[in-house]
Amino acid sequence: MELVKVKDYNEMSAKACSIILDMMEQEKNPVLGLATGSTPEGLYQQFIHQYNIGNVSFSNVTTFNLDEYVGLSEQDPNSYHYYMKDKLFHHIDINLEQVNIPNGRARDLEQECLDYERKIKESGHIDIQVLGLGLNGHIGFNEPGTAFSSKTHVVKLAESTRKANSRFFSKLEQVPREAITMGIETIMQAKKILLLVSGEKKSNALTRLIEGEVSEDFPASILKHHPNVVVLADTAAC
Ligand code: GLP
């Protein structure tokens, strides 16, 4: 795990963007793993900027998002489908047929998880997976205690995660109790992982990641066993 310290959120976003664009130049059909939350918003703005100035095209890119709430429609502004269109996909030339986000309204959620896992495999695996860090060490929606061997699955959200994410909803009761998430093993199969950590409120989680043991009690700790992880952390988080 390589820790790269950057000055601030903007530098983190710009650096993440340049690492991903470098990879996209080398791959004929790049496969990108994407995340939601506040952390990657700056990265997505950088993508849009690079696209607008003619530096990059996303027309040959396939994407897989980490997760989605169970029960929210794609039109719900709190769904990750909506987030991705609003913050990125509607502003670049990506082919929406090559965009993959778990369907949290699938009739058979278990089947949806199996299908999602199969699609990732068929794509030839994710070239770079972008990750944010939950305050309790969650990655995707893999909460503490999730087996490191987990594949895409339905999860019950920790109350602390519901509370942290309630800032996007008008009331805590509106935050879904379940989500579909790529599993930890699914994430670990990405060829490269880019973990973005910004802000003082993430400093405890970052310290535990760097100094703590590898344990299912802190899901992100497994990244220490991946051969190609870059942690981009800003001064406030460090
Ligand atoms: C959310 C998402 C994660 C995200 C994390 C951190 O619950 N499911 O994918 O990385 O929490 O969010 P933020 O970037 O807003 O701090």
Image (cartoon, rainbow, N blue to C red):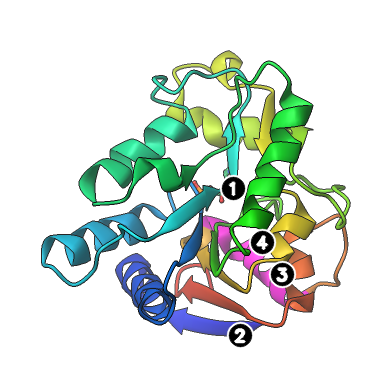
Residue 74 visible to an observer of this rendering = yes
With respect to residue 232, does 122 lie above or below? above
Q: Which residue is mark 2?
A: 2
Question: Which residue position holds label 1?
Answer: 66
Would the CB of label 4 be found within 8 Å of ligand 1? no
Q: Position of residue 25 (x, y in %)?
A: 35, 79
**47 left or right of 214?**
left
Ligand 1 near label 1 (Cβ, under 8 Å)? yes
Q: Earlier in the sequence, mark 4 or mark 1?
A: 1
Percent x, y for residue 226?
73, 76
On screen, residue 189 versus residue 43, left or right, reads right
Would you say 162 lies left or right of 90 here?
A: right
- Single out the mark in the foreground, 1 or 3: 1
Please state the horizontal and vertical placement of residue 38, each as a whole percent of the image: 43, 48
- Between label 2 and label 3, give the one nearer the viewer: 2
C-alpha span from label 4 to label 1: 20 Å
Report how far apart the C-alphas of labels 1 and 3 lie in the structure. 20 Å
- Mark carried by residue 34: none
114 over 95 or under it: above or below: above
The answer for how far apart the CA atoms under marks 2 and 3 are is 12 Å
Hey, what amino acid is under mark 2?
Glu
Disc 1 or 3, which lies upstream in sequence? 1
* Residue pointed to by mark 3: 209
> Which residue type does callout 4 highlight?
Ala
Q: Is residue 23 above or below residue 78?
A: below
Is tag 2's residue or tag 4's residue first in the polypeptide sequence? 2
Res 205 label: 4
Read off the magenta span.
201-211
Residue 179 to residue 37: above or below: above
Query: How busy is the neighbourhood of tag 1: few (under 14 within 10 Å), some, or many (20 plus)?
Result: many
